[in-house]
Structures are given as C-alpha cells and as structure tokens.
Image (spheres, rainbow, N blue to C red):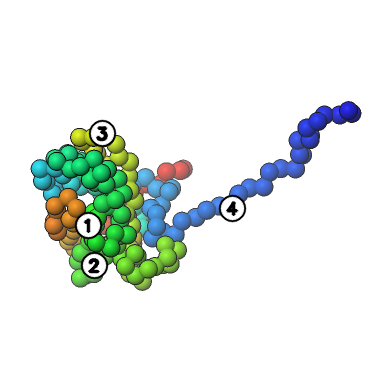
Amino acid sequence: MDGSFFPAPSSEPEPEPPVQVSPPWLQHPSDEYPARLLVREFLAQTEGTALSVSHVDVYSTGLLIKIDWELRRLGESATGWQLATGMGHFGFGSDPSGSELRFGLALADGSAVTTVDRFRNRMSFDEEPSGWSLMNYGGGGGGGDREYSSSSRLWLWPLPPAGSIELVAEWKARGIGEVRMVLDGSALRDMVANVRSLWP
C-alpha cells in the first residue's frame, strides 16, 4: 500500500463556532465585576430547613440574589429525602401542586414578579418580557442521607425602581409558607456606580 492508511490532516482552518449571546433578561453581563451587598439573613428557619439570603450582586442591568438552604432529615423516607434534596420539590415553577421552592419580588412601583411567571404564562425563554423578569438559576448542592446544602441565584432584570424591594419565598414541601424580607432598592441602584469592567 502506498502512502498512509489515514488521511492527511486538512490544511483548511477549522470554522469558528457561532457566538452564543444570551438575552439580558436571562443572564447577567459576563464582562462586569459586580458590586456586592452582604445580607446574611434568614428568610425562614424550621426544624429541618434553614433558608437564607447570602448577598446581592449589582450589575449595570440587574440584580443577582444569592439564596442558600440547609436541610436536615427528620423522619422522611428514603424516597422523600431524595425528593427534598433533588428537583422533585423545587422544580422552579414546573410543579403543578405549587409545593416546590418559589420566589418573588414586590417592587416599589407596585409591580410583582416571580420565578414561576414564565411557566404559568407558557413563555419562551427567548421571548423578551414586557416588564421585569426573575430567573432562578439552580446552584450547586451536596450532602448525604442526613444533611444537605444547596443554593440558587435569582436574576432580576432590569434594575428595579428606587424604593423598597420585598423578597418573598415559599416552600410548602418543607413546611414553609410565605416569608418576606425587605431590601433597599434605592441603595442597590446607587451601587451601580461601583460596577467595574472585567477587561481593560
């Protein structure tokens, strides 16, 4: 046999993949270093669940709110514990029973936005909302058969109006009814001046 069995490498340059740009209502700016407001307050505490707000990152186009929760197993069956620590009880709007972990914001102008709006209204994620949008990004989690830690990030787009913001949460599957926390929307808006570019 003459030559190599395998074809010679191509001399043509590989084509560049298309640049993927997420709409601003789906994701915070990737080229910004946000200003951060530490919160470190509990939204709810029960015998088996501690739900807290860690901090708020301020971007030029919106707010990213970090939520943490710690779970402790108290009599749940193995299946029940798996549901509590997985997607079974916090499907971010997909659970028709409404037992999953849900969040909402009441803004100073009287508007309300929740993490279940898009599911309820059957909106495409590519469809620009007519008002504010609140997206829930599930964070990392880990644990065992007795304790579990996890987190979420809530992306509010665009920036809220000046005035108080009420953060509302509910997690019926964990015995938590509506709980609320007030954030200072005016102070958060002022922090936009401290947002920096990642790149020179």
Q: CA distance from mark 4 to mark 1?
A: 40 Å
Residue 154, given in percent of the width and then of the height, sits at: 29, 53
Which residue is at 39% across, 68% downward? Answer: 123
Residue bearing mark 2: 112
Mark 4 or mark 1: which comes first in sequence?
Answer: 4
At a point 42% along the width and 62% down the height, the residue shown is 125
Percent position of residue 6, x then y: 78, 32
Which of the numbered marks, if any, corresponds to residue 59?
Answer: none
Distance between the alpha carbons at the discs numbered 4 and 3: 41 Å
Residue at 89% across, 28% down: 2
For image coordinates 23% across by 67% down, the residue present is 112
Type of amino acid under label 1: Ser
Tell me the kind of residue under disc 4.
Pro
Which label belongs to residue 99?
1
Few, some or many residues within 10 Å of mark 1 (<14, 14–19, 20+): many
Please, what secondary structure does the residue beneath circle 2 have? strand
At label 4, counting other C-alpha atoms closer than 10 Å, the crowd grade (few under 14, some 14-19, many 20 or more) is few
Taking depth in this image into account, of 33 and 173 the one nearest to the observer is: 173
Q: From the viewer's perspective, is the residue at label 4 or at label 1 nearer?
A: 1
Could you tell me which secondary element the residue under label 1 belongs to?
Answer: loop
Q: Earlier in the sequence, mark 2 or mark 4?
A: 4
Q: Position of residue 96 (x, y in %)?
A: 28, 63
